[in-house]
Image (tube, rainbow, N blue to C red):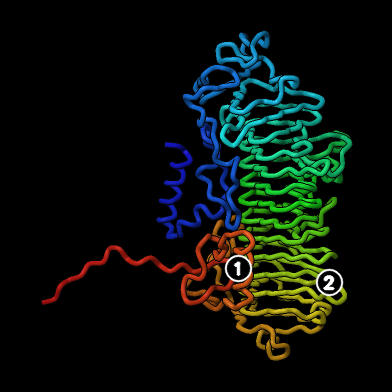
Amino acid sequence: MKKSMWNLIKTASMLCILGLPMSYASANNYAYDSDDTYTNGSDYQMPIGIPAPSFGLVETHEMYQGQYYAAGGFNYRDAGNGPYTHYIDNTDPNCTDTDNEYGTAATPRCSFIPYNSLPITEGSVVEIHGGPYMTGGTHYIIGEGTAEKPVFIRGTSFANKVPLVDDADDLRIQGFYFIMENLDINETQVIIFRAPNHHISIRGNNIHDYTLTALYHSSLISTSGWNGFSNDNIVLYNNEIHHAYKYDDPAQGVNHTKDNHGLALGSDVNHVWILNNDMHHNGGDSVQTRGLNLEYIYVGGNHMHDDVENAIDIKGSKHVIVSQNKMHGYVPGFDSDGTVAIGGHEGSKLAWFLFNEMYDGLVGLRVNDDVPTTVYVIGNKMHHLSYMGFQTRYTSDIYFMGNSISETPVGFEDNGSGTNNGTYQIHNNIFYTNNDSDSQVVISPGKIEGGNNSFSHNLLYSPSGNVGIRWGAIGYQSSALLQSATGMGEGNVDADPQFTSLTLGDRNIMAIDGTTFPGASKGTLSPEVAAAYQTFEDLYGIDIRKDFAGTAVPQGTGIEMGAYEISSPPPPTNLSAEVLR
């Protein structure tokens, strides 16, 4: 039995003991597959709202078991790690490159496939041991597989990654239908180079410690189109991507101002899946999108934390879906104001933040662009933030629905200046703030003047029982007063949500109890709310009518306020009847 399957069984058993829904086990993909023999994603549940890629997640080199390798004129070999065509091990005393194009377990090649022998042809499986093989300068890997016969370049296990590159300038990847897995790439920038490239999967690798001395705004991994051609269908799955820094002077330590990212996507790139990676301690953002003709970017199930700037910064892109990520550890300093995530920046057009958890920063999510943008924020948890949960400014269309915000002074703030004609739809949220001197919701006078606002069926509270809503220049101490004066706040509930936990680190933080929650079935399924869900389904063909735990909504006659839906209890299965005579 695979260890990943055994872990799933153990998790399911524990969920049953705790009385939690099974969907919660797979709804948040924060655990990384540590199975040392199995690294592809065939048992991976896609984050809510993200379609599965057509290539790069489930394929495995085992597909070649017992087959014939036409390019080499021999049957696939197997030294205990599955089929291979090339065997490379520079630590084996029997290794040689002389008259040894492919290598075998008995007589490996000593070096990686030389550049003048590239590209690596369809059906090739390059099994790598020993290492490293590339140091200094620029190196290339070019794989030319097909959908039926992809190329694999691989270390033998996820647990024991092979050092492929160490302290080189850059590793340039080109081609199509090929997979790189179980490799260690140290102090080297990885570039999916020029274009067109497509159907490339980089999975199960450790890519780290990029410390070049002169580059600004660079990254550990990057790609952009070239000369009018684009790169598409790229998968980055289950990698650890970390410590993209720049050291000017070892005596002074890290100079963070170079803004080096973990992963950067540029112009003319589309259909990129960034899934289940652990990205951390980078000198800029974990992920940054920035360019023209940059669209259909899927960021899901990742753990992004402790970078100098942000977990993700969405710039100049369209159709970006950020779903079920865990993001935390962002503090003011250097080039950062401590915002965990930024959506809607420098001309981005459409972004979706779905069912993410954001905490331990100054602001959870900020949308700030002087170019009109559209952002949907649905089903997220934002907590333990020193300033506020959500912040926006300028003219943007914000659809803010079904979120839970707690342990922060302000829940939602629009702090723009001047008239704002954007649309704000704020429904079904919980704003539970921890500072009685601040308001749960702040909307600027310019936004009130611009109109197009709707605000209803939200739960507002603070520990002392105070409610504060600043609507334009006037503050209101209850939803009833707001509604009487402005017509806004219909269906609001001013009451303690009685969360089951507010403990930092608790997976179920801000969960609700169906017997005590005052917002039960008091949300709205108004045409505005229904339209947000339907818009997503019309654009992407996926139903996101879910809660944070993956439970379908609604479960009963109405929808709950906040990120969690109260599940209907299953029917009893142990009933017995006594016949009375």
Residue designated by label 1: 534
Pick the front one: 26 or 229? 229
Residue drawn 87% across and 38% down? 215
Extreme residue toward the bottom, this view:
484
Q: Badge 1: how crowded within 10 Å, few (<14), some, or many (20+)?
A: some
Q: Which mark is residue 496?
A: none
The local secondary structure at tag 1 comes to helix
Residue 131, percent from left and from top: 67, 21
Q: In the rendered view, tell whether residue 225 sits above or below residue 299.
A: above
Pick the front one: 87 or 284? 87
Horizontal relation, residue 30 to residue 264: left or right: left
Q: In the rendered view, tell whether residue 257 sits above or below residue 92.
A: below
Q: Badge 2: how crowded within 10 Å, few (<14), some, or many (20+)?
A: some
Horizontal relation, residue 367 to residue 521: left or right: right
Residue drawn 65% across and 67% down? 405
Point out the image quarter for the N terminus: top left
Residue designated by label 2: 416
- Say which quarter of the image contains residue 59: top right
Residue 273, percent from left and from top: 65, 47
Name the residue type under label 1: Gln
Extreme residue toward the left, this view:
581
